[in-house]
């Protein structure tokens, strides 16, 4: 009897432990049946439409007015179509194609295509809280994209990554798409049997869930065991991207920049061309932006062009932005001024029968990068319409100058010229070569990541820089001057300085001391030039350009001739 009294509590305790264990086991393995509010999931408080870009939820909301969705301009230009341009100074939205400039004013349903008036049944662009929004249907007219609208909550799902392989998958049975990779995570949406889902991440060994996005734009996790095998899918579109035609020379470009500072200098053409070999383009520095309204100064000459053409040379008039009386950003950032500059350049090119225009804008700031490339797009249309070649001079590719958008330059213009010199320039804080071999090599390698070889021209120097270092009271001051090949050699010879080969830089080097000043110079000559030309040849570039006519020794043309055979 006593044993029974002792046994009963043990049994009860055992049953209780089993019950608690069973309850805990069931609770642990019982899926969460709660649904998360999609409004909370999207962070949508009812204001505007959530934007889902392929497989990402955008922070900026879209507007929905009178049956049309409006997307933030920055989202459009940065993600969907970079050729939309907003002039906030003159309240103009502009889109450029290979042949047309399309323009609309804010809060208008009217737009022009090359000044021809057209109308939409909706307002094309509008401002709200100082932000520009563009009708998605208008963007879609010029962009490969599709979209769908969904309610509860309001959202727009955009597809625009065509031609890229994606992973998709189908559900094997009805299942749940959850917020996190756990059966304890809240449910976002129900998934029907055979429903298609885009696979974002394969099954995690720890969780057993795949990360997916539904066609309605909900991103979450589904049990891998509830899904079929994944398959590859490449989205396609009926939208046909417009091709930009390019006017290119039949052979290699061998361009010689000719610095012309006054009308008298135009008469030196025959002299600077004498002794050259295979030069087929002369680029006189005739034009300069002269004020903040789009005006230009001109030193163009009929006689110069006639003589050049008689020698089989094309003439590409150069325009720079070096004038101290203006800032190029003030011109490029306003459409009326930018158009005036474009028209002035084209008028001069037509008036003097120029074969090309060479843009050398070296003072563009990052804040005006989009304005600059819009200028190139618009000028490109005018050049194509008039059979004029458009080329642009650029610094070698670097992060600090990425806003020059060389890839887009190549798309909308004809040639992109990389100035592979001024590695060390007048403002440098230490002495160094104008153009070391590695500098040119890197320029060739890096520009080919952005510009097709058939459109890429490498600019090389005909000059060196003599550096002068003076030390007083422990402080060293440095200054320099640019020297022609002949003058540089004369300075070194007169000083009886030893010349040594700098293997790392690919240049002859000399230094000497005179009157307490240390002189240093890396000499550009036929030997150094040939090494650079070999790098250009290895990249199969469109050709070379040289700064500047008259600074070379005539003997270097024998070397250049070997690498510029037409």
Image (cartoon, rainbow, N blue to C red):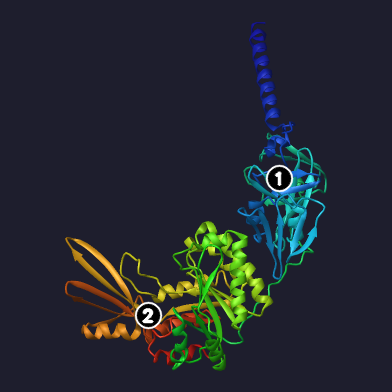
Quick one: 275 or 503, which is closer to the camera?
275
Mark 2 lies on residue:
463
Asked if disc 1 and disc 2 are in contact, CB closer than 8 Å, the reply is no
Residue at image x 57%, y 59%? Answer: 333
Quarter-wise, where is residue 25 in the image? top right
Left or right of 412: which side holds 483?
left
Whether residue 566 is visible here, answered yes or no, is: no
Front residue of 38 and 105: 105
Question: The C terminus lies in which quarter of the figure?
Answer: bottom right
Q: Secondary structure at mark 1?
A: loop
The spot of residue 511 in percent (x, y) is 24, 77
Q: Secondary structure at mark 2?
A: strand
Q: Residues within 10 Å of mark 2 (few under 14, many from 20)?
A: many
Which is nearer the eye, 432 or 491?
491
- Residue 305: percent from the left, percent from the top? 55, 87
Residue name at image x 31 percent, y 66 percent: 430
Q: Which labelled disc corresponds to residue 62?
A: 1
Name above or below for residue 294 compared with residue 312.
Answer: above
For label 1, count other residues whose C-alpha is less than 10 Å away and answer few (under 14), some (14-19) or many (20+): many
Report x, y in % for residue 61: 68, 43
Q: CA distance from mark 1 to mark 2?
A: 56 Å
Q: Earlier in the sequence, mark 1 or mark 2?
A: 1
- Image point (69%, 76%), residue name: 385
Quadrant placement of the N terminus: top right
């Amino acid at each position: 009897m006593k044993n029974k009294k002792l046994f009963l509590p043990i049994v009860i305790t055992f049953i209780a432990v089993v019950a608690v264990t069973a309850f805990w086991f069931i609770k642990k393995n019982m899926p969460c049946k709660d649904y998360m509010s999609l409004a909370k999931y999207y962070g949508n408080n009812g204001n505007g439409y959530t934007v889902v870009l392929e497989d990402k939820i955008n922070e900026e909301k879209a507007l929905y007015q009178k049956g049309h969705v409006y997307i933030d301009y920055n989202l459009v230009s940065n993600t969907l179509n970079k050729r939309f341009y907003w002039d906030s100074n003159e309240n103009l939205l502009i889109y450029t194609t290979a042949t047309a400039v399309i323009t609309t004013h804010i809060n208008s349903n009217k737009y022009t295509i090359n000044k021809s008036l057209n109308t939409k049944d909706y307002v094309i662009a509008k401002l709200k809280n100082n932000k520009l929004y563009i009708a998605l249907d208008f963007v879609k007219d010029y962009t490969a994209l599709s979209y769908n609208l969904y309610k509860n909550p309001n959202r727009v799902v955009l597809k625009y990554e065509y031609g890229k392989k994606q992973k998709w998958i189908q559900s094997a049975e009805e299942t749940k798409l959850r917020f996190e990779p756990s059966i304890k995570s809240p449910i976002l949406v129900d998934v029907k049997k055979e429903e298609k889902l885009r696979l974002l991440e394969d099954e995690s060994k720890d969780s057993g869930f795949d990360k997916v996005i539904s066609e309605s734009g909900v991103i979450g996790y589904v049990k891998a065991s509830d899904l079929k095998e994944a398959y590859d899918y490449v989205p396609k579109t009926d939208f046909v991207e417009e091709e930009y035609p390019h006017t290119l020379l039949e052979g290699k470009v061998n361009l010689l920049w000719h610095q012309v500072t006054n009308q008298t200098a135009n008469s030196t053409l025959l002299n600077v061309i004498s002794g050259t070999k295979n030069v087929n383009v002369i680029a006189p520095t005739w034009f300069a932006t002269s004020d903040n309204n789009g005006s230009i100064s001109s030193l163009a000459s009929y006689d110069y062009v006639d003589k050049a053409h008689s020698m089989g040379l094309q003439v590409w008039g150069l325009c720079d932005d070096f004038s101290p009386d203006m800032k190029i950003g003030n011109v490029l950032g306003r459409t009326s001024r930018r158009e005036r500059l474009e028209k002035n350049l084209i008028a001069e090119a037509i008036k003097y029968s120029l074969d090309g225009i060479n843009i050398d804008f070296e003072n563009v700031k990052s804040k005006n990068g989009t304005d600059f490339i819009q200028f190139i797009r618009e000028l490109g249309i005018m050049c194509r319409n008039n059979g004029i070649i458009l080329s642009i001079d650029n610094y070698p590719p670097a992060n600090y100058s990425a806003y020059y958008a060389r890839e887009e330059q190549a798309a909308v213009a004809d040639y992109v010229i990389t100035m592979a010199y001024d590695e060390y320039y007048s403002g440098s804080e230490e002495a160094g070569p104008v153009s070391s071999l590695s500098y040119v090599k890197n320029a060739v390698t890096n520009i080919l990541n952005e510009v097709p070889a058939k459109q890429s021209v490498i600019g090389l120097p005909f000059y060196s820089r003599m550096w002068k270092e003076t030390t007083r009271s422990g402080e060293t001051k440095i200054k320099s001057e640019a020297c022609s090949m002949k003058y540089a050699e004369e300075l070194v010879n007169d000083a009886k300085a030893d010349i040594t080969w700098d293997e790392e830089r690919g240049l002859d080097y000399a230094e000497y001391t005179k009157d307490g000043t240390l002189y240093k110079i890396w000499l550009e000559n036929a030997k150094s030039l040939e090494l650079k030309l070999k790098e250009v040849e290895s990249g199969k570039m469109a050709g070379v350009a040289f700064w500047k006519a008259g600074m070379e020794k005539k003997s270097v043309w024998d070397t250049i001739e070997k690498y510029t055979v037409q």
